[in-house]
Image (cartoon, rainbow, N blue to C red):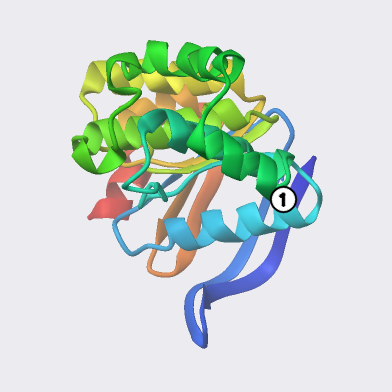
Amino acid sequence: MKARLDGATLGYGTTPVLRGVNLTLQAGERVVLLGPSGAGKSTLLAAIHAQLVAGGERVALVPQDHGLVPQLSVRRNTYMGRLDDHGALTNLGRLVHLPQALRADIDAVLAPLGLLDSASRPVEALSGGQRQRTALARALYRGGAVIVADEPVSAVDAMQAREIMAMIAARFETAMIALHDVDLARSFATRIVGLQGGRIRFDAPAAEIAQDRIDRLYG
């Protein structure tokens, strides 16, 4: 597994957000993107995700807007992580009635995220933190070797954030994740990529990045 960008200009439509992007994601790496809002973290994640999918990788995705169906339950939103494993008729039937075996598999994912008591509730009735954890549950249920996640712990408390990042590290061999919490980034990442002003400002092993370099990203 490998994703690579060489001198890429990334953006939306004709509007560039990032220029001169040189970045490689290798199997086994845990890469965290740091930088202020609007620095291009979501844009870079989207480009890497698209390249991995185009290369045939099974990618678990946690978008910043969660990408949930508000009217469906937590359990059914979690099931949607595997929609592309089945045909339309099978999926339609399971979204109406989930077989007991599937319910048990999904509930095993929901339980450590503290969502089991809310499994039958529609997503639109949940708090922001519960919705964020539902999006993560969908990614965990999908599985695969790699996860791409955009601020997956921004709506939970510090203890939950550490627990969730530990789950991600244990479940996925490879990760590219945007975070704002620098301490959490340092504890999780093998590499940290700093973004500011439409450019990559640094890309280095987490242990080699001095705090002042990170401070300048947000200064």
Residue 167 percent across, percent down from the top left: 48, 17
Instruction: State the image quarter where residue 147 is shown.
Output: top right
Residue 75 percent across, percent down from the top left: 43, 28
The foreground one among 133 and 55 is: 133
Residue found 49% across the figure and 63% down from its top: 43
Residue 10 shows in this picture: yes
Image quadrant holding the C terminus, namely bottom left
Q: Crowding near pointer 1: few (<14 within 10 Å), some, many (20+)?
A: many
Residue found 63% across the figure and 54% down from its top: 48
Q: Element type at marker 1?
A: helix
Residue found 35% across the figure and 30% down from its top: 133
Determine whether, in the image, residue 112 is placed left or right of residue 144: left
User: Which residue type carries mark 1?
Assistant: Leu
Question: Please, is residue 150 above or below residue 199 in the view?
Answer: above
Residue 208 shows in this picture: no
Residue 87 percent across, percent down from the top left: 73, 46
Image quadrant holding the N terminus, namely top right
Question: Please, is residue 134 above or below residue 7 in the view?
Answer: above
Residue under circle 1? 52
Question: Please, is residue 106 above or below residue 86 in the view?
Answer: above
Q: How many marks?
A: 1
The foreground one among 46 and 41 is: 46
Residue 3 percent across, percent down from the top left: 73, 50
Residue found 58% across the figure and 44% down from its top: 92
Please, which residue is most extreme toward the bottom here? 14
